[in-house]
Image: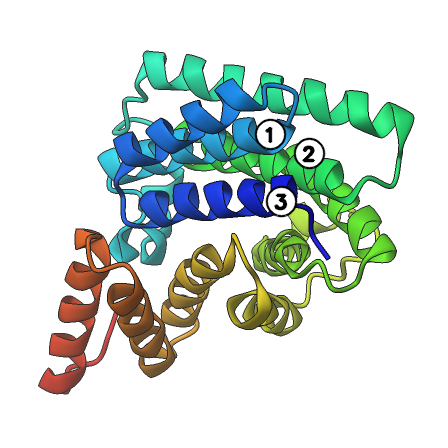
Amino acid sequence: MQSASAQQKVAEIDQAFTRLYNFDFPGAHAILAKRISGHPEDPLGYSVRASAYLFSELDRLSILESQFFSDDSRIIDKKKLKPDPVVRAQLLRAIDDAQARAQTILSNNPNDQDALFVMCITSGVLADYSALVEKKQIGSLSLIKKGAAYAQRLLKINPNYYDAYLTTGMTEYLIGSLPFFVRWFVKVDNISGDKERGVKTVELVAKQGRYLKPFAKILLAVANLREKRPRVAETLLFELARDYPENPLFKKELSQLTMKLQSGKPLP
């Protein structure tokens, strides 16, 4: 049974993620500032702060729109995006704050589950920022590998820590999506590069996850669009729009996809 302090921590982090998924970034940061002020030693608040900075930049740059992910040329185009240097500095500082505290905890207890989860989150945030915003796709692979190692450590200790499966599932899918000549040089322990296995692992997070359940649905919607399964993507977008009604992107993506499906025209 959780202590009152642990229950408060979960509630505050839940509230911050709810604001984040509604794209109310100032609201998320206000909750996190209060959490961090009261518990400066806890790395989880800093890791969620880094996530909020990442999502705000992905939203500002329209990176989360389905067209961005369905068009590989937009993903690798290195000219169009202009990262905000202030947000970048804030994101990196939040990651440093989170990882320094998590490593201190792990030095005393290598099996601390929440500290390992923080390392998963922050490695993933940094990898996403590096690949999608800074367009350093190849360089981000080492960060993806690092995050997968932490996730596997965590899941070995607690196979029911479902949020950690997001890291292993997406790593499986991403490695499987790489060209063969790149995949040959990218070796991640216990990751075979099976895209379908990766999708099924992320589906587990979409069903059983806590903090990362909505993010898993976002990634699954994108993956299913790429794999020509638009009806599955439509269902996921419907659930996201229903659960986070303040988020304009979910409504927009759902409306556009539904209209395309009703028109009977083939999707790109």
Residue at 87% in and 41% down: 111
The residue where tag 3 is placed is 4
Percent position of residue 233, x then y:
35, 73
Residue visible at 52% across and 35% down in the picture: 125
190 left or right, relative to 210: right
Q: What residue did someone put label 1 on?
A: 139
Q: Position of residue 30 (x, y in %)?
A: 34, 28
Residue type, mark 2 in image = Ser
The answer to whether residue 146 of the structure is visible from this angle is no
Mark 2 sits on what residue? 142
Front in this rendered view, residue 89 or 109: 109
Tell whether 74 sits left or right of 164.
Answer: left
Residue at 68% over, 42% down: 117
Circle 1/circle 2 CB separation < 8 Å: yes
Quadrant placement of the N terminus: bottom right
Q: Which of marks 2 and 3 is nearer the N terminus?
A: 3
Residue sitting nearer the eye, 262 or 56: 56
Could you classify mark 2 by the number of other residues whose Cα lies within 10 Å: few (under 14), some (14-19), or many (20 or more)?
some
Tell me the mark number nearer the camera, choosing from 2 and 3: 3
Q: How crowded is mark 3: few (under 14 residues within 10 Å), some or many (20 or more)?
A: few
Q: How far apart are marks 2 and 3 (CA)?
A: 39 Å
Whether residue 3 is visible: yes
Q: Callout 2: helix, strand or loop?
A: helix
Residue at 56% over, 35% down: 127
Q: What element carries label 3?
A: helix
User: In this rendering, is residue 101 above or below 123?
Assistant: above
Q: Choose between 3 and 167: the one closer to the eye.
A: 3
Looking at the image, which is closer to me, 122 or 15?
Answer: 15
Q: Which amino acid does label 1 sit on?
A: Gly
